[in-house]
Image (cartoon, rainbow, N blue to C red):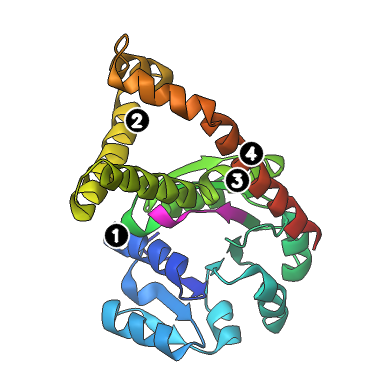
Amino acid sequence: MDNQRITVIGGGQMGRALVGGMLDNKVVLDANVTIVDHNATSRQWWQENRPNVLISQDLESSVQGADLVVLAVKPKVLGNVAKQAEHFWDGKLVVSIAAGVMLETLCGWIGHRRVVRVMPNTPCLVGQGACAYCVADEVSSDDEAQIMTVLSSVGMAFAVSESQMDGVTGLSGSGPAYVCLIIEALADGGVFAGLPRPLAMKLATQTVLGTAQMIAETGRHPGELKDSVASPAGTTIAAIRVLEQNGLRATMIDAVAASAQRSRELAKD
């Protein structure tokens, strides 16, 4: 993708993550990246941290000069952004990361169907994202290969049907927040058991990180790994009993379902 010109509209966290991944992995040249952002603080961040990319406030010319456009703005302003550049979308591969905005809606705003909808998540910021995408019917296999290249530069990427995107939103899109709550709660438990807060936080974080990596690298089922820790009449099975009594599994399932339902509601709005 060295010769591809990429415009990212919206220079916030996810825009920074995607561009950072592409640049750090040499997916695209700095000089071929344009960031469109009207926020002065955001523009200053780009100037200080990614000084070789072009920073612009001119939406229309930035879209016109691009081969690939990433829409990294909030869902509530996405329609207005699309309409501002309505005469310049022809021939562009357009990628949206706005939660809940359907492909049909995006295609209507853009005026063609070479459009991709992506659900990334915040671990993209450290190159460990879990991203899913779906495509409209004018997206070619070469286009899709480009999208996989971009998303793989910040973690893992999966092609899904659009009917699965709400589930993706509920699981991996919102999931980092659930994991943060779990880490915080584990650390609180450590403090309650007498550990100093900094040590409890480090132990909780590394425990979650290490366990996730163990599952990913071994391919073993989490239940199998859980059973290997839970000795008969031991400390772990005593704790698991409390978690089951308090409905941890059902609560996590309900949380994912609630997030997915909210994603469906946003699509209707």
Residue 63 horizontal side relative to residue 112, left or right = left
**Quarter of the image containing the N terminus?**
bottom left
How much space separates mark 1 and mark 4, taking CA atoms?
A: 40 Å
Residue 168 horizontal side relative to residue 178, left or right = right
The residue pinned by badge 2 equals 216
How much space separates mark 1 and mark 3, taking CA atoms?
A: 31 Å
Q: Amino acid at mark 2?
A: Ala
Residue 70 horizontal side relative to residue 137, left or right = left
The residue pinned by badge 3 equals 170
N-terminal of the pair, mark 1 or mark 2, is 1
Dot 2 falls on a residue whose secondary structure is helix
How much space separates mark 4 and mark 2, taking CA atoms?
A: 24 Å
Residue sitting nearer the eye, 236 or 118: 236
How much space separates mark 3 and mark 4, taking CA atoms?
A: 10 Å
Residue sitting nearer the eye, 222 or 37: 222
Picture coordinates of residue 116, whole percent (x, y): 62, 55
Q: Residue at x 42, y 62 (%)?
A: 18
Q: Amino acid at mark 1?
A: Lys
- Within-10-Å neighbours for mark 2: few <14, some 14–19, many 20+: few
Q: Residue at x 68, y 57 (%)?
A: 100
Q: Which mark is residue 26?
A: 1
The residue pinned by badge 4 equals 254
Q: Residue at x 58, y 84 (%)?
A: 59
Dot 3 falls on a residue whose secondary structure is helix
Q: Residues in magenta?
A: 117-123
How much space separates mark 3 and mark 2, taking CA atoms?
A: 21 Å
Contact flag, marks 1 and 3 (Cβ < 8 Å) = no
Q: Amino acid at mark 3?
A: Gly
